[in-house]
Image: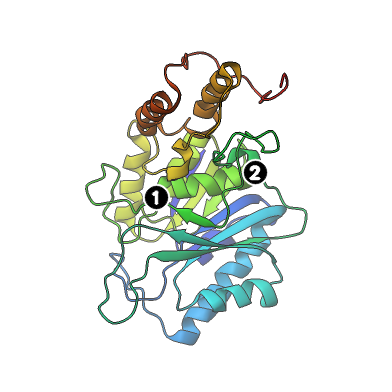
Amino acid sequence: MIDIRISDAIEGLNSLSDNSVDLIIADPPYNLGKDYGNNHDLKGFEEYLVFSREWLNESKRVLKPSGTIYVFMGVRFISYLYDILDRDLQFFFNSWICWHYTQGMGKTKGFSPRHDDILMFNKSKEFNFYLDKVRVPQKYSRARNNMRGANPGDVWLFSHVHYCNENRMKHPTQKPEGLIERMILASSQKGDLVVDPFMGSGTTARVCQQLERKCIGFELNEEYVKAANQRLAAPFNGFDSVDERMSRIPNDLHYEKIRNEYLKNHINWFLSNHPDALDGFLKTAYEKYGYFNWNTTPVAQPTLFDEY
């Protein structure tokens, strides 16, 4: 069920029941004066904080006790949102994620910005988190390493959705699908309800559609809603971005049985939604280890090193 509604965030959240949502992914306006088609992103300072408290308060009401909220925010207001979430609403702080991207605004005096911040908070200490769904490949094959992969950490490298990308929408702050994929996989399961109070170009809805989550999104601009629904109807050819580490192949896979088992699992674990990255992975695997028979059913769990 994917449901995109023409509504502002507060009205939309008001329409949802208490404790009904598993995950909220929110990319609110940063209050920097961007033009979103039918309204400009520029409120007075205190007005913006009041607006933020109101929609975040509603977010806490609708989240299940096991639920999580991710909030994108620019540098001007990130500390104020942290304070609202932590002190005012008494969410439980989890992570301050830095999304590092490869291109951004140029500056000649001072350093050019190359990141956005993402706050991750939980409604309670008993929250859901599925680390195995978001691990990244290890650098080395070692008996002490979990060969299912490592924790991706709190610095995430995903490129912007460039204007030449076929998924690029007419929206000033479109987020990469791979970025949203990580949040959804980490903090929800199939069939869970994900809510995006500021739906924009429909990225959260598109990712939920492919990952078999329910999704409700709220968006004021009718043109964005129309474009998002068209995006949902388009064929799926893989998410438009991927963490570069997903194609990393561990060094020191010396034993043929271990190597073939791992490489088959690698495709299933890390590249199942990223067919565009498959050729690069196969090329790297061949250059590093030579031919392997990857086109077989991956095993369900790693059994590496059992015989050594």
| Residue 222: quarter of image | bottom left
Residue located beneath label 2 in the image: 131
Query: Residue 89, image x and y in percent?
Result: 68, 72
Secondary structure found at label 2: helix
Q: Residues within 10 Å of mark 2 (few under 14, many from 20)?
A: some
Q: Is residue 240 visible?
A: yes
Nearer the observer, 194 or 137? 137
Q: What residue is drawn where x is 49% and y is 54%?
A: 156
| Mark drawn on residue 72 | none
Image quadrant occupied by the C terminus:
top right
Query: Residue 153, image x and y in percent?
Result: 58, 53
Q: Residues within 10 Å of mark 1 (few under 14, many from 20)?
A: many
Q: Is residue 130 shown above or below 70?
A: above
Residue located beneath label 1 in the image: 176
Q: Is residue 281 shown above or below 168?
A: above
Q: Is residue 296 shown above or below 131?
A: above
Q: Is residue 220 left or right of residue 215?
A: left
- Measure how far apart labels 1 and 2 are at the Cα level: 20 Å
| Residue 242: quarter of image | top left
Q: Is residue 174 left or right of residue 16?
A: left
Q: Amino acid at mark 1?
A: Pro
Q: Determine the residue located farthest toward the right in the rendered image.
A: 126
Q: Determine the residue located farthest toward the left in the rendered image.
A: 164
Q: What residue is drawn where x is 38% and y is 27%?
A: 287
Q: Amino acid at mark 2?
A: Leu
Q: What residue is drawn where x is 52% and y is 36%?
A: 211
Nearest to N terminus: mark 1 or mark 2: 2
